[in-house]
């Protein structure tokens, strides 16, 4: 079977969304749609609707929406590429290797091959007499030979260029060896191995590629731990040690435990705790958390008790909260309308460790103790309360105000109203501020956030072959003007995009912005599945033919485009409401019909108001 040139479109043509959803949701026909209990939140009355003609679904309870791909991604905890492979297998569609035949794809493949060869070299060196001290150290830390082999640990000999010569003899070029992060060039000429006299820990990406190394000295040399430099393959802030070994367990248990060290991960896996990963010795970054978010909604942070009060610990928690703060809950509005607000979409728990003990020490001393620590991990809200309120003197207005500013946003993210009320009461008692005033402040903060209608955009069944001029224009503004891309992206939302492919591109762009990165079009194209990459290339070629915009015109065009995106969003809502209203005709569900009619009237009012404010025709309307 030949590889499909457009597997996304072919998969959607071969697989029926109703059939796929029915494997997880009991659906009943309701007119031209199908209805069932939402798989993404608990409910007693079905509010999950599948639109077979449009090839998408929408839950009017929690706001979940999407198409065939997004349903599989959410229900099976897969990223886009994994969902593409899974659905292609079900549909009998062959997809090309993600390493394209172009020069950049070939170069990436060569770098990975070099790293694989280096892993073999390091593993062999660990077995020699020269690696005896390293073997003794690993054995002394409790590692079995099976664990050493499974994680492919090795030894970098204490010689200047042993790996370099090994690779050169096998046909590698100096430039590629340096590009892979395995050697460095001397100022006086020649090359030397980057790792010498160290135990090496291969770092494998969540996609299964060896991308870099962590290395530990046996003596007192500084730094004790050394990572590969930033390369075309390796980014310390976007890598997690052990994620390749852990992701199956993480998905099965719907939980990940994050520790700080390589040996913590190794011992945890050796003793059967296979949902453990490490952050490479740094505070968690947005890109690391984004990897975890694809696998689970429950994150346990096993923090060193000695650093619990450090600002770094708080920053790490903030990163996790920000990346996971994408759940939506329905908030009643006047006139029977509903607004969806963003809330924390994950359980973030803190496993406090006994003072002075690392996870590997706790596990080796008693696996049941570690299991108990993780199982009894505390909610992040409780942990924040202890950090902020412990030993604080709230006789000072400044101290009390600072505590409120830190804790109120976190309390506002608690979904359970009873728990939220208890947290508010606890804070009010400690800072001596009336509880009613704190509750009013939470309400005020919500009003300052962007309102979202009850029905999020329901994407049409589309492929890169389908045109979406508005999507294409918005992507052009993002990628053709890199200097303003970050500020423009900050104003955009996932639900602004009509095409699932556009949304995937937008998410990849946002990942590049994490930790201060900039838009790299070449890297972006390499990171996307080939059909989407080809489509985006064509879109950019089209956008390059447009006249360049000066800063003032660009700002106006961005504002107009955002307005058009939001208007399209509302028109999509109206279309979905109309379908549901038509299906309710002749039924006895008068209350449901009245609620939908109010939503229609609200959306029509907003559409008219926005058009009057803009005072112009919507040139880029879909």
Image (cartoon, rainbow, N blue to C red):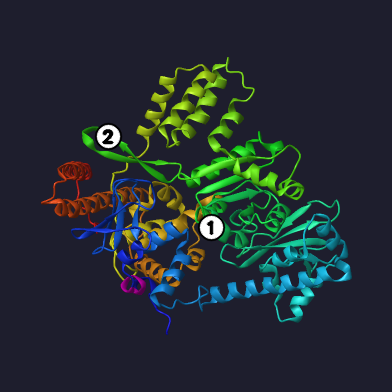
Magenta residue check for 339: no
355 or 545, nearer to the observer:
355
Name the residue beneath numbered marker 2: 333
Please name the residue shown 75% across and 64% down the image.
Answer: 148
Binning the other alpha carbons within 10 Å of mark 1 as few (below 14), some (14 to 19) or many (20 upward) gives few
Q: Secondary structure at mark 2?
A: loop
Query: Residue 450 appears in which quarter of the rendering?
Result: top left
The reply, left or right, for residue 302 in relation to residue 453 is right
The one nearer the camera, 557 or 242, is 242
Quadrant of the rendered image containing residue 402: top right
Which mark, by number, is residue 279?
A: none
Local packing at callout 2 (Cα closer than 10 Å; few below 14, some 14-19, many 20+) is few
Q: Quadrant of residue 601?
A: top left
Residue at 54% of width from left, 76% of height from top?
103
The N terminus: image quadrant: bottom left
Residue 595 vertical position relative to residue 20 in the rendered view, above or below: above
Q: Are marks 2 and 1 in contact (CB under 8 Å)?
A: no
Q: Which residues are magenta?
A: 10-14
Q: Secondary structure at mark 1?
A: helix
Magenta stretch containing residue 12, yes or no? Answer: yes
The dominant secondary structure in magenta is: helix
On-image quarter of the C terminus: bottom left
Q: Is residue 238 above or below residue 410?
A: below
Q: Label 2, label 1: how many angstroms apart (C-alpha)?
A: 38 Å
Q: Which residue is the extreme one toward the left?
A: 586
Q: Which residue is mark 1?
A: 252
Residue 583 vs 467, above or below: the answer is: above
The picture places residue 172, in percent across and down from the top left corner, at: 70, 78
Q: Is residue 486 visible?
A: yes
Single out the mark in the foreground, 2 or 1.
Answer: 1
């Amino acid at each position: 079977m030949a590889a499909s040139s457009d597997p996304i479109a072919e998969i959607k043509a071969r697989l029926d969304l109703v059939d796929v959803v029915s494997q997880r949701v009991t659906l009943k026909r309701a007119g031209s749609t199908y209805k069932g209990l939402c798989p993404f939140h608990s409910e007693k009355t079905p509010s999950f609707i599948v639109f077979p003609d449009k090839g998408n679904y929408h839950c009017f309870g929690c706001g979940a929406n999407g198409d065939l791909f997004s349903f599989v991604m959410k229900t099976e905890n897969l990223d886009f590429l994994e969902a593409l492979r899974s659905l292609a297998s079900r549909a009998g569609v062959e997809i090309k290797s993600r390493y394209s035949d172009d020069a950049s794809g070939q170069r990436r493949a060569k770098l990975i091959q070099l790293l694989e060869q280096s892993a073999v070299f390091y593993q062999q060196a660990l077995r020699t007499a020269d690696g005896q001290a390293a073997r003794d150290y690993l054995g002394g830390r409790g590692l079995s030979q099976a664990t050493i082999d499974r994680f492919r640990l090795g030894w970098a000999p204490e010689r200047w260029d042993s790996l370099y010569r090994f690779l050169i003899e096998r046909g590698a070029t100096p430039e590629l060896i340096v590009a892979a992060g395995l050697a460095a060039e001397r100022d006086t000429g020649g090359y030397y191995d980057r790792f010498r006299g160290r135990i090496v820990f291969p770092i494998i990406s969540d996609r299964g590629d060896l991308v870099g190394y962590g290395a530990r000295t046996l003596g007192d040399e500084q730094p004790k731990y050394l990572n590969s430099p930033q390369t075309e393959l390796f980014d310390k802030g976007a890598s997690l040690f052990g994620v390749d070994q852990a992701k199956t367990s993480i998905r099965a248990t719907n939980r990940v435990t994050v520790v700080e060290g390589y040996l913590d991960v190794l011992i945890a896996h050796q003793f059967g705790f296979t949902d453990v990963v490490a952050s490479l010795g740094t505070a968690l970054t947005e890109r690391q958390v984004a990897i975890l978010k694809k696998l689970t909604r429950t994150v346990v942070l096993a923090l060193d008790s000695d650093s619990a009060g450090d600002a770094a610990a708080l920053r790490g928690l903030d990163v996790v909260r920000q990346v996971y703060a994408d759940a939506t809950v329905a908030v009643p509005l006047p006139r029977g309308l509903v607004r969806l607000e963003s809330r924390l979409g994950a359980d973030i728990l803190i496993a406090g460790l006994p003072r002075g003990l690392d996870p590997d020490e706790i596990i080796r001393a008693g696996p049941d103790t570690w299991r108990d620590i993780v199982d009894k991990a505390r909610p992040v809200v409780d942990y924040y309360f202890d950090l902020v309120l412990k030993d604080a003197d709230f006789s000072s207005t400044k101290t009390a105000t600072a505590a409120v500013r830190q804790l109120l946003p976190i309390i506002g993210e608690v979904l359970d109203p009873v728990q939220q009320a208890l947290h508010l009461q606890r804070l009010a008692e400690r800072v001596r501020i009336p509880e009613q005033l704190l509750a009013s402040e939470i309400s005020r903060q919500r009003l300052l956030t962007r309102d979202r209608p009850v029905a999020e955009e329901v994407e049409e069944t589309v492929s890169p072959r389908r045109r979406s001029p508005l999507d294409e224009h918005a992507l052009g503004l993002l990628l053709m003007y890199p200097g303003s891309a970050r500020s423009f992206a900050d104003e955009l939302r996932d639900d602004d995009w009509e095409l699932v492919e556009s949304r995937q591109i937008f998410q990849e762009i946002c990942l590049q912005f994490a930790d201060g990165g900039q838009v790299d079009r070449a890297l972006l194209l390499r990171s996307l599945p080939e059909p989407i990459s080809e489509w985006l290339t064509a879109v950019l070629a089209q956008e390059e033919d447009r006249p360049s915009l000066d800063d003032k015109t660009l700002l106006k065009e961005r504002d107009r485009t955002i307005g058009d995106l939001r208007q399209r969003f509302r028109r999509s809502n109206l279309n979905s409401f109309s379908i549901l209203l038509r299906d309710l005709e002749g039924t006895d569900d008068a209350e449901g019909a009245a609620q939908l009619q109010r939503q229609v009237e609200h959306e029509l009012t907003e559409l008219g108001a926005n058009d009057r404010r803009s005072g112009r025709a919507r040139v880029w309307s879909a």
